[in-house]
Amino acid sequence: MDGLLQTAVEQAFNAIVVTTANLQGDGPIIIYCNPAFCVMTGYKAEELIGRSPRMLQGPLTDPKVLRRLRACLHSRQFFEGATFNYRKDGSAYLVEWNVSPVLDAHGDIRAFVSVQQNITERVQAQESQALLARALDATDDAVLIADEKANILFVNQAFEQLTGYGSAEVLGPTPAYLQSGTPPPAFHTKLREALAQGEGCKATFSDRQKHGRLYYVAQTITLLKDDSGATRHYVGVSKDVTELVMRTQELREQAYHDALTGLLNRRAGQAQLHSCQRRAQAEDNGYALILGDIDKFKQINDRFGHEAGDHILRQCATLLKAVVRSGDAVVRWGGEEFLIILPSCQLEAACELAERMRASIAAQRDAMARSITMSFGVSAWQSPEDSAAVLRRADRALYLAKKNGRDRVTALPS
């Protein structure tokens, strides 16, 4: 670079960066940046040279602007635009920049030169609402900007669509105005602690729109600091992940629940049983098991068909769930067999519960099979035995109930 030209570039007020012309892979690589660019980004020149300008991008960087930039570079056109970039310390700034191709004598692109300016203060002082709207309304993510006291200064259109609140309703108050009570108090405590320590935070949580619809968001809160390090603004970016969360919950429901009865399946039941065992050993707080089996179920299937059998399984599942306590787990253990896991329950109370179950089943009349009965085996944990021993004892008790005439409750204390 010519000496005078290099001195002019080094002392230029605007940030200047030169990159390679390679548009493949990670794209252009920084080969030169002036001191103004280092001041703007917070990086040293040696930390920037050899790396892609993508290192400056973050949650608020507008993908539409980046797509337009790439299109201009590929078509050898001049580019001009503005969006958010991020300093080395993680704080965001609004940058306005232009990119020009540098051609050699043959008309081939040898490099790209970009002149950039941090326009954050200008936006804040002169036309914050208009420029922020242009910079942020294009994004699909909800954006909220608040001052150092957390009073809301700006929300974009995506925020209005996500929450159901118009900008006129939310500008001025703090985001606490929007809290529906859906996120747990622990979430708000963690958020306040992070912000008080001058840190950003990320979290996924549920909330409700103005008119009550539940939605889920993955939210990132970034602090905008001045040159002295004092926080001047907060920027919250929320991505609507409702569809993803609901699909995940649906898959989890399918993985842990029996499709026919809606009860926990054996896999989920085993997890519940192991959890109950761990609590019992840690707190010396016992639990009980009830193992139930529909009497003569094979005969019902053989005589009336599997559709009738499925109906009876669903009917029994409903009756069992109606009898148990809120913290108990009802599991379709296999075929026509059900396991009921009773935390913090002794043998006598478990036997009483099993008898209510037996009576409830026996009182029902099915249109085809008519009388339906179940037999139950009951056991309770005794330290220091494991859950397998408790389950084997319930199974033996069930065997005895079947052997001694069915439609009865049998317990084995030990």
Image (cartoon, rainbow, N blue to C red):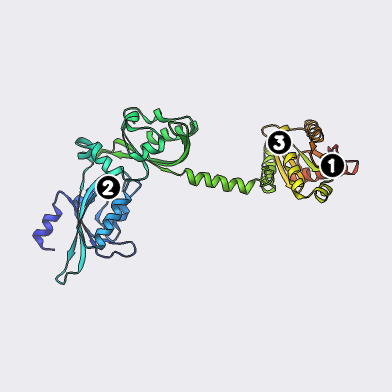
Instruction: Answer above or below: position of 19 versus 116.
Output: below
* In this rendering, position of residue 366 left or right of residue 247: right
Image mark for residue 286: none
Real-space CA distance between mark 3 and mark 1, rounded to the nearest whole angstrom = 21 Å
Q: Quadrant of residue 150?
A: top left
Instruction: Kindly give the residue lying farthest to the left in the view shown.
Output: 4
Residue 83 percent location from the top left of the image:
27, 47
Mark earlier in primary sequence (2, 1): 2
Instruction: Answer above or below: position of 119 versus 102.
Output: above
Real-space CA distance between mark 2 and mark 1, rounded to the nearest whole angstrom = 71 Å
Real-space CA distance between mark 3 and mark 2, rounded to the nearest whole angstrom = 56 Å
In front: 369, or 229?
A: 369
Residue that numbered label 3 is attached to: 321
Secondary structure at badge 2 equals strand
* In this rendering, position of residue 226 left or right of residue 348: left
Between marks 2 and 1 in the image, the one whose residue lies nearer the viewer: 2
Q: Quadrant of residue 319?
A: top right
Image quarter where the N terminus lies is: bottom left
Residue 204 percent location from the top left of the image:
46, 41
Residue that numbered label 2 is attached to: 83
In front: 135, or 125?
A: 135
Q: Tell me, yes or no, if residue 222 can be seen here.
A: no
Residue that numbered label 1 is attached to: 397
Residue 399 percent location from the top left of the image:
85, 45
- Circle 1: residue type: Ala
- Circle 2: residue type: Thr
Between marks 3 and 1 in the image, the one whose residue lies nearer the viewer: 3
Between marks 3 and 2 in the image, the one whose residue lies nearer the viewer: 3
- Circle 3: residue type: Lys
Task: Please give the name of the residue rendered at 45% of the width and 31% of the height, measured from the top-left corner.
Answer: 211
